[in-house]
Image (tube, coloured by chain):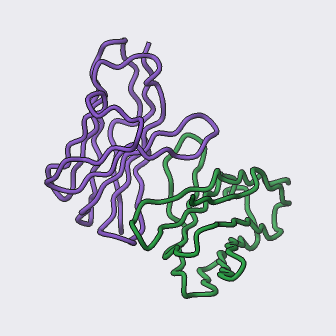
Amino acid sequence: GEDVEQSLFLSVREGDSSVINCTYTDSSSTYLYWYKQEPGAGLQLLTYIFSNMDMKQDQRLTVLLNKKDKHLSLRIADTQTGDSAIYFCAETLDSNYQLIWGAGTKLIIKP
Amino acid sequence: GAVVSQHPSRVICKSGTSVKIECRSLDFQATTMFWYRQFPKKSLMLMATSNEGSKATYEQGVEKDKFLINHASLTLSTLTVTSAHPEDSSFYICSASTGPNQPQHFGDGTRLSIL
């Protein structure tokens, strides 16, 4: 079945770049998404990439997609304390538009 | 743009009470809305998908008589937890989309606590 995997934690120093990785199994994914969830809050759509793209950049965020390896990454440049959150990777498939979620990566910022 | 408002943000009530949660798309028309439940330190669990004007499609294991979903307009969907019990306590989040393969935009969630 479809599966999306992420590591559970990532710890980086303030000012460094954070790279959050995600792998997925289904090759028929159409869109891949990154959502951010701060403690006790809902989910905020950060960015998304269509499956025929390799890269998308939006200010401090860079998304890289390696379709051959089924690997998606989110790079946050100059990580700040306000970036502390859980980051969820998700995909939609050709067959429908339900989201398939990763378990989320908790980004911890060290001073 | 793409703002989804969910109300209330927090509910505390006694066992046996029915609770209604509203989800509104404020600046776009949502042909499809989704209701999720999130357990502590876990990812989201899709409960149901609703299209405007039709009955909701529930995921396996979700009791449709327990979780009533109404999507009466392109900007409003409601989830009613009927006769709520402590095991229904959770964080419920809605999302809205303009169509297939379009991003889902999420509300801020409702924390439901049943005493």
Q: Residue furthest front?
A: A1
For the point 30% across and 69% down, which residue is it? B99
Q: x and y percent of residue A47 in the render? A: 54, 72
Is A38 displayed left or right of B19 in the figure? right
Where is the N terminus of chain A found, in terms of image quarters?
Answer: bottom right
Is B51 displayed left or right of A38 in the figure? left
Q: x and y percent of residue A3 in the render? A: 61, 59
For the point 33% across and 63% down, which residue is it? B97
For residue B15, above or below residue B40? above
Judging depth in this view, the residue of A90 and A45 nearest the camera is A90
Where is the C terminus of chain A found, in terms of image quarters?
Answer: bottom right
Is B41 displayed left or right of B44 in the figure? right
Q: Quadrant of residue B27?
A: bottom left
Query: Chain A hue?
Result: green
Q: x and y percent of residue B95 in the render? A: 38, 54
Q: Quadrant of residue A36?
A: bottom right
Is B90 displayed left or right of B85 in the figure? right
Q: x and y percent of residue A13 in the render? A: 86, 60
For the point 42% across and 60% down, which residue is it? A98
For the point 33% across and 44% down, which residue is it? B58
Q: Which chain is purple?
A: B
Q: How many marks?
A: 0
